[in-house]
Image (cartoon, helix red, strand yellow):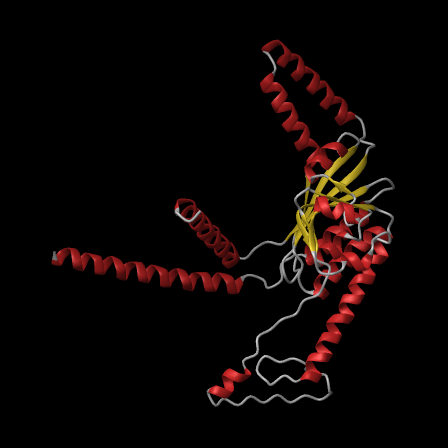
């Protein structure tokens, strides 16, 4: 028994030492990596992927003789395609999965610039948008990036499969056409700001808080100081000004809307939003891509920055934790 105890302590010490060495190596490796690393534009031939998937299914369902004929026809088609120039217009597919601070706008900027640099008359852009909104300045910049496409007379279609609310809809309304899956969440055209105030708690524990400003409205609402009615009124005035600008932006791009009816902060399912004019058609992005693939060359574009070692390890840890929690939830009796 004593041997097992000593052996267990030895294993624990060894594991601790290895973890410490690994942490040091990780810190050294991270410090030697360049702070700013240039990303790369990843271009995917979605037309070929769609065609390949269709061909694989047709081959699997066909008989032996029919399969040979299909293979021969496909090879002849590919040979003819390599010799001829593809004169079809291009459909560039971009993806935007927005976070609260809209940090994805950095990649969107690069993707939009790349499209503008190569676009020809007749080319179009499909943006698959998913965002519940976030900070005003971040999503305002994202909408401005999409406006660059409109300014260059490049047709822009936005597809909403899950959600485009608040700042997400600010982006969507720039498009020539808005598509949405029937149960997607659309709308929430409003502005919200909230923060706790710990002033009473600080006073209860005899903690003094001082804040000095120059300018009457440099700080209207504070977390630790005592807020007054004048500051609250000014804060609400600022929110109202942002909301009015938001309403004006949506009305500018969707002039047929009853703007006062749809800018109450409410959100709707896409089937309801279509009746209000917030959405042009009920359709998933997949259906739209399949319909366009027959007369467009579909090209996927994404800008990716290489992740550091710590980011990759953190990503793996997060995925592992998410998977473990998912399995625990599936096995729990509270589902």
Q: Residue at x 83, y 53 (%)?
A: 257
Q: Residue at x 87, y 48 (%)?
A: 153
Viewer-proximal residue, 44 or 185? 185
Give the percent coordinates (x, y) of residue 219: 68, 82
Viewer-proximal residue, 178 or 182? 182
Viewer-proximal residue, 3 or 144? 144
Viewer-proximal residue, 310 or 152? 152
Give the percent coordinates (x, y) of residue 139: 72, 60
Q: Using the image, determine if residue 88 lies above or below residue 207.
A: above
Quarter of the rendering containing residue 19: bottom left
Quarter of the rendering containing residue 78: top right
Quarter of the rendering containing residue 49: top right
Q: Using the image, determine if residue 51 lies above or below residue 145.
A: above
Position of 240 compared to 227: left or right? right
Position of 117 compared to 129: left or right? right
Q: Residue at x 77, y 41 (%)?
A: 281
Q: Quadrant of the N terminus?
A: bottom left
The residue furthest top is 65
The residue furthest left is 1
Give the percent coordinates (x, y) of residue 256: 86, 51
Give the percent coordinates (x, y) of residue 105: 70, 57
Q: How many marks?
A: 0
Position of 298 compared to 66: left or right? right
């Amino acid at each position: 028994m004593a041997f097992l105890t000593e052996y267990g302590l030895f294993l624990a010490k060894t594991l601790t030492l290895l973890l410490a060495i690994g942490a040091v190596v990780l810190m050294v490796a991270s410090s030697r990596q360049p702070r700013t690393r240039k990303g790369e534009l990843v271009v995917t031939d979605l037309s070929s992927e769609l065609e390949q998937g269709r061909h694989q299914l047709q081959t699997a369902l066909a008989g032996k003789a029919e399969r040979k004929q299909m293979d021969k026809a496909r090879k002849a088609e590919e040979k003819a395609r390599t010799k001829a120039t593809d004169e079809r217009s291009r459909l560039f597919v971009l993806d935007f999965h927005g976070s609260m601070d809209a940090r994805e706008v950095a990649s969107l900027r690069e993707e939009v610039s790349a499209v503008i640099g190569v676009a020809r008359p007749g080319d179009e852009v499909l943006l698959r948008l998913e965002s519940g909104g976030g900070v005003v300045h971040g999503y305002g910049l994202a909408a401005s990036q999409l406006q660059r496409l409109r300014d260059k007379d490049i047709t822009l279609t936005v597809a909403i499969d899950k959600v485009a609310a608040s700042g997400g809809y600010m982006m969507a309304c720039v498009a020539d056409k808005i598509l949405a899956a029937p149960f997607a969440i659309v709308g929430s055209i409003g502005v919200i700001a909230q923060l706790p105030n710990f002033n009473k708690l600080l006073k209860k524990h005899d903690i003094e808080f001082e804040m000095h400003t120059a300018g009457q409205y440099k700080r209207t609402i504070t977390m630790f100081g005592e807020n007054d009615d004048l500051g609250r009124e000014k804060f609400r005035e600022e929110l109202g000004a942002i909301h009015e600008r938001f309403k004006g932006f949506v009305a500018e791009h969707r002039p047929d809307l009853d703007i006062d009816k749809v800018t109450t902060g409410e959100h709707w399912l896409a089937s309801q939003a279509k009746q209000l004019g917030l959405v042009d058609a009920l359709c998933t992005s997949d259906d739209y891509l399949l319909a366009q693939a027959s007369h467009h060359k579909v090209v996927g574009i994404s800008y990716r920055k290489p992740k550091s070692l710590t980011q990759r390890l953190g990503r793996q840890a997060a995925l592992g934790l998410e998977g473990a929690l998912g399995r625990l939830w599936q096995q729990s009796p509270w589902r």
